[in-house]
Image: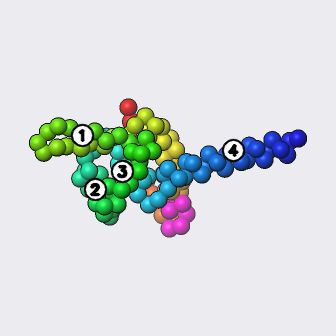
Amino acid sequence: MEHTYGKEACQAKLRASRDALEVIQGKWRIPIIVSLTYGNKRFGEIKKDIEDISPKMLSQELKELEMNKLISRTLYDSMPVTVEYALTPLGASLNNLLQELLQWGIHFRSEMTGKEMKVPELAEHD
């Protein structure tokens, strides 16, 4: 009986982990989310934060993140038209996970290089 429960729990956790990774996987999604933890930004501001992303890739990833309800896109009726991106409450709920991931990344880099690295914490998002 316990074996069946353990298998069901394992399967549920595997499904949940696949769902989470599908939404945040890839080279650019987490950096985009981290950029937006420091406030709402326009396309060019995100591009400046993530220097090595191409405009086409940034546009594609922003659409995916918006489709998955992690960011919102607001169009302002101004001249010229202004578009601003922001974390949604669902996107902001990644903050603790990202903080842990960043801390692990710092630890990993320190282990691999033998050099200690200090990085400030993520911004708190309202």
Please state the extent of the stretch shown in magenta in the rendering. 108-113
Callout 4 amino acid: Ala
Discs 1/2, front: 1
Task: Report whether 50 appears left or right of 92.
Answer: left
Label 3 belongs to which residue? 62
Callout 1 amino acid: Leu
Q: Given contact means CB atoms under 8 Å apart, are the residues at marks 4 and 1 in contact?
A: no
| Residue at (86% x, 41% y) in the render | 2
Task: Report whether 126 appears left or right of 103.
Answer: left
Residue 75 shows which numbered tag? 1
Mark-to-mark CA distance, 1 and 2: 18 Å
Q: Residue 122, relative to residue 111: is it above or below?
A: above
Query: Which is nearer the N-term, disc 4 or disc 2?
Result: 4
Write down the quadrant of residue 67 in the picture: top left
Label 4 belongs to which residue? 12
Mark-to-mark CA distance, 4 and 2: 37 Å
Callout 3 amino acid: Leu
* SS at mark 1 in the image: strand
Callout 2 amino acid: Lys
Query: Which is nearer the N-term, disc 4 or disc 1?
Result: 4
Where residue 97 sits: x, y (%)?
A: 52, 44
Query: Which is nearer the N-term, disc 4 or disc 3?
Result: 4
* SS at mark 3 in the image: helix
Nearest the viewer among 112 and 39 is 39
Nearest the viewer among 75 and 117 is 75
Label 2 belongs to which residue? 47
